[in-house]
Amino acid sequence: MSKKEMIQSDIGSVLSAQEIAEIDAELAHIPYKSGAAIDALKIVQAKRGWVSDECLQGIAKYLEMSAEELEGVATFYNLIYRRPVGEKVILFCDSVSCWIGGCDDIKSKISNVLGVDYGETTADSSYTLLPVPCLGACDRAPVMMVGDDLVTHLDDKKITELFGSAANGSAK
Ligand code: FES
């Protein structure tokens, strides 16, 4: 068995064949293995929702990096989740334009409706609420991402429309 095959069989107990194939596809056009670090983390997160310690170590080994180096990348890139998250992550912008637009009140409303503060997940695992810096949609502030959707011009009505079903107590 070649060294690559040995590493693949070892990593194969942690990462799926599809994850390894997708990481390989990224590696095909990146000169240094560590250059695929963020993509590899995203690939695993897309399949599992978050990146566990075990997966992080598997990815690091596959990319010939130390786990500490890869942890540094994961920590720097704030959209890599190192703890389990809800089905949808709410990325709530609390930067200056959204703050001027009243995002503090909107955030309070979300917290009241869903029963979560920043960093928390609803009891039914539907949503995790996280703060993020500017989402690049300042002209439509206040804004947030709910899963893959950008929601703009936030106000109480929109929050009720979005999370109304959770407001009746299904979330925490
Ligand atoms: S400050 Fe919120 S999108 Fe820019």
Image (cartoon, rainbow, N blue to C red):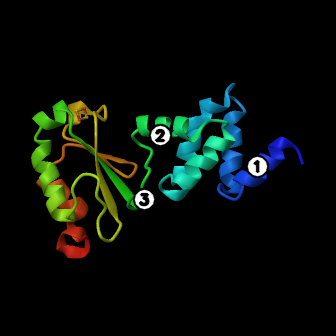
Q: Residues within 10 Å of mark 3 (few under 14, many from 20)?
A: some
Instruction: Place residue 35 in its image quadrant.
Output: top right
Sequence-wise, which precedes: disc 2 or disc 3? 2
**Going by the image, does 12 lie left or right of 138?**
right
Q: Amino acid at mark 1?
A: Gln
Q: Picture coordinates of residue 5 (x, y %)?
A: 83, 47
Q: In the image, which disc is placed on residue 74?
A: 2
Marks 2 and 3 sit apart, C-alpha to C-alpha, by 14 Å
Query: Label 2 crowding class (10 Å Cα cut-off): few <14, some 14-19, many 20+?
Result: many
Q: Position of residue 52 (x, y in %)?
A: 51, 54
Find numbered disc 3 in the image and state the secondary structure of the residue it sits on. Answer: loop
Picture quadrant of ligand 1: top left
Kindly give the residue lying farthest to the top in the view shown.
31
Kind of residue at badge 2:
Ala
Q: Are marks 1 and 2 in contact (CB under 8 Å)?
A: no
Amino acid carrying mark 3 in the image = Pro
The disc placed on residue 8 is 1
Residue at point 19%, 37% (across, down): 141
Above or below 20: residue 170: below
For label 1, the SS is: helix
Sequence-earlier tag: 3 or 1: 1
Where disc 2 sits, the SS reads: helix
| Residue toward you, 6 or 50 | 6
Could you tell me which residue is drawn at 57 percent across and 54 percent down? 54
Q: Is residue 38 visible?
A: no
Position in image of residue 171 (x %, y %): 25, 70
